[in-house]
Image: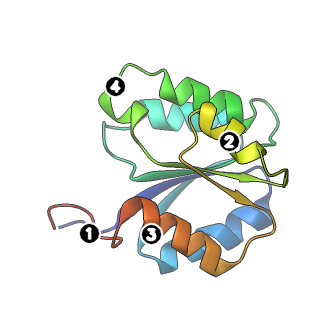
């Protein structure tokens, strides 16, 4: 029986992706990645409903930025689109930027650079004890 949680990690920087992916795997996630917002929306849309447990989305990316990708995911006609936790990763540290992102559908926001502890605590606050429900 599959016990791994599944994360969709979206970042155009290969180094950032590698570091975050390793951290998520250490937390028990199976990680699926996309390097721009357009690919992220496609991966989410093509997945089965409730396949992903969380999305971690960089905001500044080519092709489609994270904000537009989040808007597109939230507008999809499927039950999980409106409720899946989405963590935005941003270099913008303005105190009110997190509120702006929440208005766009972000569940929580982490400012770069961030520590392993910050990522783990934020993820844990959104997906609980890191156990797939019903297992």
Query: Is residue 38 among the parts visible in the rendering?
Result: no
Assess whether mark 3 and mark 4 are in contact (beta carbons under 8 angstroms): no
Dot label at residue 124: 3
Can you tell which of label 4 and label 2 is closer to the viewer?
2
- Whichever of callouts 1 and 4 sits on the residue coming sooner in the sequence is 1
Spatial CA distance of label 2 from label 1 is: 33 Å
Residue 88 locus on image (x, y percent): 65, 49
Q: Position of residue 12 (x, y in %)?
A: 77, 49
Mark-to-mark CA distance, 3 and 1? 16 Å
Quick one: 117 or 47, which is closer to the camera? 117
Asked if the residues shown at circle 2 and circle 1 are in contact, with their CB atoms under 8 angstroms apart, the answer is no
Mark 3, mark 2: which one is toward the viewer?
A: 2
User: Which label lies toward us, 1 or 4?
Assistant: 4
- Could you tell which of marks 3 and 2 lies nearer the N-terminus? 2
- CA separation, marks 4 and 3? 24 Å
Mark 1 to mark 4 CA distance (whole Å): 24 Å
Residue at x 59%, y 26% (from the top left corner): 71
Whole-angstrom CA distance, mark 3 to mark 2, is: 20 Å
In the rendered view, does 22 fall on the left or right side of 78? right
The quadrant where residue 114 appears: bottom right
Query: Residue shown at 45%/69% (left/top)?
Result: 124
How many numbered discs, if any? 4
Q: Earlier in the sequence, mark 2 or mark 1?
A: 1
Residue 40 against residue 121 in the figure, above or below: above
Which numbered marker is on residue 78? 4
Labelled disc at residue 50: none
Disc 1 target residue: 3
């Amino acid at each position: 029986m599959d016990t791994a949680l599944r994360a969709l990690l979206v970042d155009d920087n290969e180094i950032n992706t590698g570091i975050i992916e390793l951290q998520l795997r250490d937390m028990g996630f199976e990680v699926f990645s996309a390097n721009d917002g357009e690919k992220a929306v496609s991966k989410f849309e093509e997945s089965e409903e409730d396949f992903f447990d969380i999305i971690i989305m960089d905001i500044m990316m080519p092709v489609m930025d994270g904000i537009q990708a989040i808007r597109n995911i939230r507008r999809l006609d499927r039950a999980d689109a409106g409720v899946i936790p989405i963590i935005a990763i941003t270099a913008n540290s303005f105190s009110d930027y997190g509120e702006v992102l929440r208005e766009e559908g972000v569940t929580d926001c982490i400012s770069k650079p961030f520590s392993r502890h910050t990522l783990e605590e934020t993820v844990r606050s959104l997906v609980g004890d890191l156990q797939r429900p019903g297992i």
